[in-house]
Image (spheres, rainbow, N blue to C red):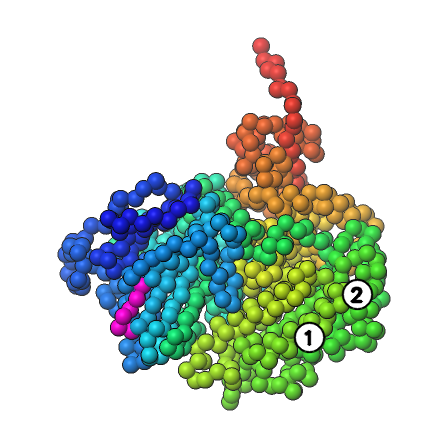
Amino acid sequence: MSIRFDRDHKIVHISNEAVSYVMEIVDGKYLTHRYFGKKIRKYRGAGAPYYFKRGYNTEHDCSIENVSFDDFPFEYPVRGHGDFRIPAFAVTQENGITFSEPVFKRWQIIRKRPKLKGMPHIHAKEGEVETLEIVCEDETAKIRLYLYYSIFAQHGIVLRHQKIENYGTQIIMLQNAQSMSLELPAEEYEFLSLYGTHAKEGNIQRFPLHYGVQRLESVRGSSSPQNQPFFALMKPGTNNAQGKVWASHLIYSGNFLAQVEKDQFGNIRAQLGMHPDTFCWKLSPGDTFETPQAVLNYSDKGLNGMRENFHWLYQYHLIPGRFEKRMRPVLLNSWEAMYYDVTLEKIEKQADLAKQLGIELFVLDDGWFRSGNDSRSSMGDWVCNEKKLPGGINTAADLIRGKGLQFGLWFEPEAVSENSDLYRKHPGWALQVPGYQTVKGRHEFLLDLSIKEVRDYLFDKLSFYLDDGKVDYVKWDMNRPLTDVNSFMLAREEKGEISHRYVLGLYELLERITKKYPEVLIEGCSSGGARFDPGMLYYVPQNWTSDNTDAYDRAMIQKGYSLLYPQITMGAHVSIVPNHQTGRSTSLHSRYQVARLFNLGYELDLTKCSENERKEIALQIKGYKEQRKWIHSGHLNYCEVPNENYLAWSVNSKEAEKSILIIMQKLFDPRYSHGRIRMSGLNPEWDYKEHTTGKVYSGGELMEAGVSVPLIKEDFYTFSMYFSKIEDEEDDKDNCQ
């Protein structure tokens, strides 16, 4: 990796073995973007735009003849000086002026990754990362802008974030500070994003980029199931195996805005950061503000190349280091077996069977603290209902641990019921707007996590259950969006800070909990995938992917999320049929095959399973345990399929000596009797044995000729094929004469 500054041509060139990022300083003050893509040895100005005089335009004090700021490739653009496209930065000065123009002042190389105070960020060991710090100043407004660019020695990843400093004597209101802005040349691109809703998250959307602004956003207080804080731009024809991709992902769990503008000349400007519609931050003299970190990802090997970059980064440089290689236990969650009707007798019956089948962790979900068997009371008090569980949680934990299982417990720390002792004692701790009826979600209000006393209360409540070491796992749920976003603790001019302060409060609470209880495995959840984002993964090593556990829907959801997240971060459960979300019935075999590449769990009533079903589950778990270590550290790829009736994934071990292929046929259709799935990432010179049939194939033929898909008369049937390298195998002799 290297960061080079060409002082003669005022060129800054950031590069590693995979990628280059190039900027130019024009006239000693204008920081412009020149290139982001495949590594180039040296940049001397190729591709710089030509300008000619146009009507209905602006003139600028610039050495470039006929330059127009209306199509000038600014690295961090503002509005108001002739650039009319989407801005990355906006302030209001104390005198009411809504303009600022920070210009280049200096730069320096930092040999490590700067840590963001109070926010998640990519971590790295000494010497793994180099960082470029560029300082721009607006000497009139007394604003200093720090731009950060970090790069590893390998992979097409550049990390971006900004810091804004008020070094003057007036108050500045910061209204927009995007985490990244990227200029791409006037060419044809396609736009890809992940959209959805509760129980239908992670749908892939792809369309040609059109003129104007295309935007994705969340103003729900969290990253949301509606839109992932991510987008990718691709050259037409790009697929999983080949093509150029420019992607960005925000390491943040609150409101965000992703937008891409194709201007009147076809130039592309892409941005990602906090949503300016729900954000305004007071910067008093001497104050600073840091934006969340954004990941820029370039791949010239298609979507699987993009996927590999994200997976490597998140598994080894985002999730807590103590969990990056730790195998996750196979769990049984009580929800679909008991719902709110929790009893010690039911728990013991499930635990006895779970132990027999090879399950390692029993998770007690919602219901253990409720005064009744619904969601209308008790949230926020976190007092075990001893009518349901005599002796409290300790008794339940001792029961489970006495059977050789780990014990897990469900919480929803951020919520409070109107019918709770906590709300009656501290009504001002809930988000609410005076004079207006407070909106409920799942019969709940939300606690204002910007209040220190609220965070202290929740820390103490969680510590009460974690202190004795009997809770090995926490399912941290959050089941509603933010409404009534107001805080009694903030002044009038600070009201625009509440949404961000809520997220910062969440991060602080998670930091305290994970620091005090580093060995407790925490799984993030928000009605499934409503807060599945890189920001949460910095504190908790995995997330509940979706409340929808139907095999077909889950296959589609996991197809989308696996573009971004490694398999070790995604919870996947085998649940009851007919499925409680869709009513669809699929075989136990297919439900397992869909889940087995991820963190396996079961969410069903084992007492209602037949003896044959329990035998099958035991065999599933045994097989999963034998393979999970290399599967969870291996390379996950989505395979190109012959038509839309199939879904297919493969995981290869790090050296490609092992591979598992999973194929789902959506519907039985005799027309598709000649479908083939081409694998990827194998060694073309090696021979591989398929363990079900015993047949031997070369890596080259598996990747080029492909695997024939069996025709099974069953909808949603899911196949698995396990391949391993053959050592010292004689070449097949050619018997042809």
In three-dimensional space, the C-alpha distance between marks 2 and 1, rounded to whole angstroms, equals: 17 Å
Name the image quarter holding residue 73: bottom left
Helix, strand or loop at disc 2? helix
Q: Is residue 686 magenta?
A: no
Picture quarter with the N terminus: top left
Residue 46, image x, y percentages? 26, 44
Depth check: give the residue in front, 207 or 275.
Answer: 275
Q: Return the mark for residue 461.
A: 1
Residue 581 in the figure: left or right of residue 102: right
User: Badge 2: how crowded within 10 Å, few (<14), some, or many (20+)?
Assistant: many
- Residue type marked 2: Ala
Residue 523 in the figure: left or right of residue 118: right
Magenta residue span: 136-141
* Depicted 479 relative to depicted 321: above or below: below
Q: Earlier in the sequence, mark 2 or mark 1?
A: 2
Name the image quarter holding residue 511: bottom right
Q: Is residue 417 visible?
A: yes
Residue 192, image x, y percentages? 44, 53
* Depicted 194 relative to depicted 446: above or below: above
Helix, strand or loop at disc 1? helix
The residue to which callout 2 is attached is 397
Depth check: give the residue in front, 47 or 552.
Answer: 47
Q: Is residue 140 magenta?
A: yes
Picture quarter with the C terminus: top right
Q: Return the mark for residue 281.
A: none
- Residue type marked 1: Lys
User: Which residue is at 62% across, 77% downward?
Assistant: 456
Q: Is residue 593 visible?
A: no
